[in-house]
Image (cartoon, rainbow, N blue to C red):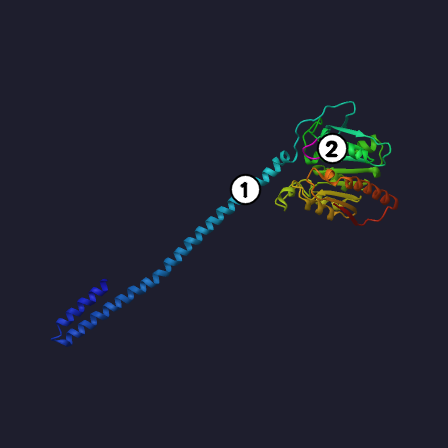
């Protein structure tokens, strides 16, 4: 507006001097030219400065975004670190659910001494007509009292049974942990083979849920064992909940160990298992590199495979025992064959 005002008065002044048009016109043109020059120069300076403001705004926004991303990254790193520390130091409380002993020691109770000097409880029930002895490893929230009916059924199907409690379960001493479950099953196996004089090639390891961990571990370390049965077992503890690997470590890594198992394997899993999803049973089965059988049970949850399978459960165990007989008789070279039952 200032520039326009000046030009307007210049025109009026020039008009007043039209009586002497030569010098007046010249003054007018000179003044107008100077004003136009100043206006253009001012506009040019503004045009030069305007991109600077845009650049400053862009830099400010970029800096804000970088700070926000940095804050988010730091927050995620802290959260992940806390998650790792929790899994490292407190996961045992989630893995092992010892609800207190459901039984008292009796004359039939056995006491085994583990490698760390702890006394754990066990029970043995002989079947005089049986060739194979099943060493049963129970789930996370059970003890020997909870498995009586289950062991009775296995006994009825023609097997001797030997069950034990982990460190801190039932009337066993100590504190449960992954390494201690390995000590526990080692003590059970040593008792069965040395005290009960059961040959190693007549021993079947049966792991239910958490019990699959020590069972797979022992079978992978001992090629003399006759067979391995897994029911409702996970690939690893943490992947049972996270599906994919989220931590730089894990516990009970059954998936990496089971390819090293040399005895025949029977994998059973319920298709409707909400605790350990069915696909984990499939992953374990597919990872087996020796003779294997499977029993996939429609409508069965984590704890109801035997009940939902009905007679197919008994048939699966009998067929598996027959497979062990054939393998022992023919002593085949290391290989892999597959077969299965589907309900």
Check the picture and name the quadrant holding the C terminus. Answer: top right
Is 342 one of the magenta-colored residues?
Answer: no
Q: Residue furthest right?
A: 329
Look at 53% across and 45% down and name the residue there.
76
Look at 78% across and 40% down and name the residue there.
311
| Mark 1 Cα shell of 10 Å, populated few (<14), some (14-19), many (≥20) | few
Estimate the x, y position of residue 79 in percent, counting from the top left.
54, 42
Estimate the x, y position of residue 216 in percent, counting from the top left.
74, 40
On the picture, is 1 further left or further right than 164? left
User: Does the image show residue 187?
Assistant: no
Please give the label number shown on residue 79.
Answer: 1
Q: Nearer the viewer, residue 34 or 135?
A: 135
Contact (CB < 8 A) between labels 2 and 1? no
Q: Residue furthest bottom?
A: 22
Task: From the image, tell me which residue sits under label 2.
Answer: 184
Dominant secondary-structure state across the stretch colored magenta: loop
Q: Is residue 2 above or below residue 326?
A: below
Question: Which residue range is magenta in the image?
Answer: 138-142
Q: Nearer the viewer, residue 302 or 88?
A: 302
User: Does the image show residue 33?
Assistant: yes
Q: Quadrant of residue 14?
A: bottom left
On the picture, is 110 further left or further right than 69? right
- Say which label, 2 or 1, has the lower sequence index: 1
Under tag 1, what secondary structure?
helix
Q: Give the CA separation, mark 2 to mark 1.
A: 35 Å
């Amino acid at each position: 507006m200032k520039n326009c005002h000046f030009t307007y008065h210049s025109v009026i002044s020039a008009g007043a001097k039209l009586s002497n048009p030569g010098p007046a016109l010249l003054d007018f043109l000179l003044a107008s030219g100077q004003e136009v020059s100043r206006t253009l120069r001012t506009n040019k300076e503004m045009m030069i400065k305007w991109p600077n403001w845009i650049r400053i705004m862009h830099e400010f926004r970029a800096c804000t975004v970088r700070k926000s991303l940095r804050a988010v990254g730091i927050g995620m790193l802290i959260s992940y670190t806390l998650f790792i520390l929790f899994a490292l130091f407190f996961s045992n409380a989630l893995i092992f659910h010892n609800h207190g002993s459901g039984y008292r020691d009796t004359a039939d109770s056995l006491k085994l001494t583990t490698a760390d000097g702890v006394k754990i409880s066990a029970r043995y029930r002989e079947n005089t007509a049986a060739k194979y002895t099943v060493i049963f490893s129970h789930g996370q929230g059970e003890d020997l009292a909870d498995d009586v009916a289950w062991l009775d059924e296995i006994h009825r199907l023609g097997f001797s049974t030997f069950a034990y409690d982990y460190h801190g379960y039932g009337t066993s001493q100590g504190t449960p942990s992954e390494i201690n479950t390995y000590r526990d099953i080692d003590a059970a196996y040593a008792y069965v083979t040395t005290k009960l004089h059961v040959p190693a090639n007549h021993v079947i390891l049966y792991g239910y849920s958490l019990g699959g961990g020590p069972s797979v571990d022992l079978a992978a370390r001992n090629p003399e064992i006759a067979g391995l049965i897994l029911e409702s077992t996970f690939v690893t503890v943490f992947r049972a909940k996270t599906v994919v690997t989220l931590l730089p470590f894990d516990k009970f890594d059954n998936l990496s160990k089971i390819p090293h198992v040399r005895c025949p394997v029977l994998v059973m899993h319920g298709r409707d298992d909400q605790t350990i999803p069915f696909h984990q049973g499939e992953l374990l089965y597919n990872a087996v590199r020796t003779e294997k059988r499977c029993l996939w049970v429609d409508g069965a949850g984590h704890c109801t495979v035997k009940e939902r399978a009905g007679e197919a459960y008994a048939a699966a165990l009998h067929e598996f025992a027959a497979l062990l007989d054939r393998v022992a008789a023919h002593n085949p070279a290391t290989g892999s064959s597959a077969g299965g039952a589907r309900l």
